[in-house]
């Protein structure tokens, strides 16, 4: 996750403003997800169902993991062309994050849950 991105960026000789902004966005997203997870945990500890916030957390979390893996892979530069060692492992991780939008409920299903339960939109009968 974001901790690995921070370690990769810390190892760079210099960091430009664009990269700094991307990393900052990932850090902010990570904190937001932690708060959603905390809220869901508190609801469960009080005996309530997790509620639609768990769907929001999953939807946002999947995209966040993809963004973090992509950034780490981009930071490899030319070294990312090798299919062995750390670069190969990271390529596998990056490609594996794609299955997160399918496994355990697609992004479209989660968006429907958010739309219906949080935004109060009508149910999609298709």
Image (tube, rainbow, N blue to C red):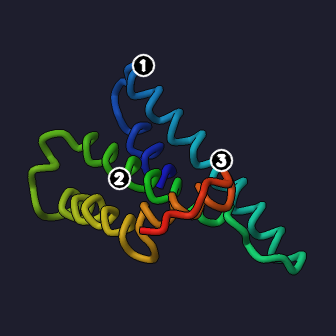
Q: Is residue 101 left or right of residue 43?
A: left
Q: Quadrant of residue 101?
A: bottom left
Residue at the image point whose x is 57% and y is 44% from the top:
29
Local SS, label 1: helix
Residue 13 drawn at (x, y percent): 34, 28
Which residue in the structure is indicated by mark 2?
69
* Real-space Cα separation, disc 3 to disc 2, in angstroms: 18 Å
Which residue in the structure is indicated by mark 3?
32
The reply to whether discs 3 and 2 touch (Cβ–Cβ < 8 Å) is no
Answer with mark 3 or mark 2, whichever residue precedes in sequence: 3
Q: Is residue 3 left or right of residue 121?
A: left
In the displayed structure, would residue 46 be above or below residue 85?
below
- The numbered mark at residue 84 is none
Which residue in the structure is indicated by mark 1?
17
* Real-space Cα separation, disc 3 to disc 1, in angstroms: 22 Å
In the displayed structure, would residue 60 be above or below residue 96?
above
Residue 89 drawn at (x, y percent): 24, 65
Badge 3 local density, few (<14 within 10 Å), some, or many (20+)? Answer: some
Residue lying at the far left of the rendered structure? 82
Q: Nearer the viewer, residue 52 or 43?
A: 52
* Real-space Cα separation, disc 1 to disc 2, in angstroms: 20 Å
Residue 115 drawn at (x, y percent): 59, 55
Badge 2 local density, few (<14 within 10 Å), some, or many (20+)? Answer: many
């Amino acid at each position: 996750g974001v901790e690995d991105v921070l370690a990769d960026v810390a190892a760079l000789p210099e960091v430009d403003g664009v990269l700094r902004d991307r990393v900052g966005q990932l850090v902010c997203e990570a904190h937001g997800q932690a708060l959603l997870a905390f809220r869901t945990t508190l609801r469960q500890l009080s005996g309530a169902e997790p509620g639609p916030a768990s769907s929001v957390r999953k939807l946002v979390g999947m995209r966040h993991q993809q963004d973090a893996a992509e950034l780490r892979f981009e930071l490899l530069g030319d070294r990312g062309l090798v299919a062995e060692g750390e670069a190969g492992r990271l390529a596998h991780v990056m490609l594996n994050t794609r299955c997160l939008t399918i496994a355990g409920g697609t992004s479209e299903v989660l968006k429907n849950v958010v739309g219906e339960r949080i935004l109060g939109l009508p149910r999609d009968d298709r």
